[in-house]
Image (cartoon, helix red, strand yellow):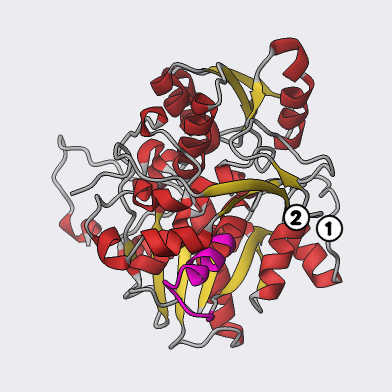
Amino acid sequence: MIDGATADIPNFVTHLECSKTGERIEAHTLQNLSSAGVPILVRYDLDGVRAALTKDALAKRAPNFWRYRELAPVRDAANIASLGEEMTPLIRLHRSTDGHALVKDEGRLPTGSFKARGLAMAIAMAKELGVTKVAIPTNGNAGAATAAYASRVGIESYVFCPSDTPPINIQETELQGARVWKVDGLINDCGKIVADGEAEMGWFNLSTLKEPYRIEGKKTMGLELAEQLGWEMPDIIFYPTGGGTGLIGMWKAFEELEAIGFIGSKRPRMVAVQATGCAPIVKAYEAGEEHAELWQDAHTVAAGIRVPVAIGDFLILRAVRESGGYAAAVEDEAILDARARIGREDGLLLCPEGAATAAAYFQALEDGTVGKDERAILFNCGNGLKYPMPDAGAPLDIAQPIDWNALR
C-alpha cells in the first residue's frame, strides 16, 4: 500500500494566485498575503492531475490525508513529518435526531483537532521553503498543532493565545515544544502581536489565511468527505466558522474534484455556523455585504469560533452564497444543550464548536430549512475531552448503608 506521506508523487502546482485580483504569483515561494492584502490560493495543472490519478489508484493508498498528494503543494516527501493523520470517521446520529445527520469527527486527528490538517501542510511547506521560526495566534487548537508539527521538523514555534484559552490547550502546546504567551485580549489582538513581531523576531507568520498552504491542508476535509461518500455530495454541510479556512478549502476541493472528473456539478449547501456572541459573517450575510465588520465584545463558550474579524470573509461569504447555503448564529445555551443531548443520546462527546453545528442543524430541522431526509454533515472540529465540562458525579459514602432507591 502506497503511503502518500512518504511516497515520491508528482507535483502539479502551476502557480499561486491572489484570491481577489487573480494576480499570478510564482509557485513554491514563501508568501503571506498578496499585494492586494488578501489571501493567496494555490493553483494546479488539473488536466495533469486528471491524467495521473484515478479512483482505483487512490483506493490503494494508505488511509491518511496525504493520499491526495497530487492536489497538495508539497514536492518532497522528506519535508512531511507525519504524526499519523488517519482519515476521520463519519458517525451517524441515531437517537438525538430523526434527521439524516452524519458527524465528521475531526477530534480523531493528531493533537485532537482539525487544525492538524492545515498546520501539517503549512509546516511541511515552511520546512520545504527554508523557514526556521514560525509564530501563530490561536484560540487553542491551532497552537497545539503548530507546536507538534514544528517540533517534529526542527522549526521553532511561538504561540500567542487569549488568556482565557482552555488551560489544556496552553499546556499541550507548551509540552509539545512551543514558547507560549497568554495575551490579555482576543485572537485578533494576538494576531497583531504576531504581525508586529515579524521584522523584530524574524519569524514567519502562520496566521489563518495569511499564508497559502494551511488552506491546502484543510481542503483535504472536502476531498476525504467526497471519497467517503462514494464521490457523491451531501445535501448540506454545517461548518463551525471562525477564520473559515476549512469552509473555503472544501469549496475549493469540490471545484478541483469536478475538474479532474471525480464528482459532478452537484454541490452541498454550505452553512457557516457562528455563535450569537460573535457572528460577523452572519451579520454580513444577512446584510448582503461582501465583507464583515469587526465584531465588538466577542464572547461565546465556543472559543474556536470567537474570531471578531476574518481576513477571508469575502471568500467565506462567496462560498456560502454560490452554494445556495446560508450563515447561522446559535445561542450559547443551544450549543451546550446540543452537546449534552448528543453525548447523552448518541454517546458522542462533541467540542463546543462542533456542538454549535449540531445546534444549527436542530434549529434548521425545526424551522424547515433542512428536511429530515436530506443528508447533512456536521463538522466536529475537536476532541471534546480538550474542553471544560460541567462538574459531574454524586458522592457515595461506603461507610454508610447504600440507599439503592436513591441510585435509581
Q: Give the image location of residue 21, x and y in percent.
A: 81, 54
Q: Name the side, left or right, on which 124 lies relative to 61.
A: right
User: Badge 1 local density, few (<14 within 10 Å), some, or many (20+)?
Assistant: many
Q: Which residue is mark 2?
A: 313
Residue 54 versus residue 135: which sits nearer the camera?
54
User: Badge 2 local density, few (<14 within 10 Å), some, or many (20+)?
Assistant: many
Where is residue 135, by image quadrant? top right
Q: Which residue is mark 1?
A: 291
Farthest residue toward the top? Answer: 200
Q: Earlier in the sequence, mark 2 or mark 1?
A: 1
Mark 2 and mark 1 in contact? Answer it, CB < 8 Å: yes
Q: Give the image location of residue 260, x and y in percent.
A: 46, 67
Secondary structure state at the residue bearing disc 1: loop
Instruction: Give amino acid for label 1.
Output: His
- The residue depicted at 61 percent of the width and 84 percent of the height is 369
Residue 374 versus residue 17: which sits nearer the camera?
17
Residue 53 versus residue 397: which sits nearer the camera?
53
What is the CA distance from the residue labelled 2 to the residue labelled 1?
6 Å
Q: Give the residues drawn in magenta, as a range.
A: 252-266
Q: Name the side, left or right, on which 197 lies relative to 340.
A: right
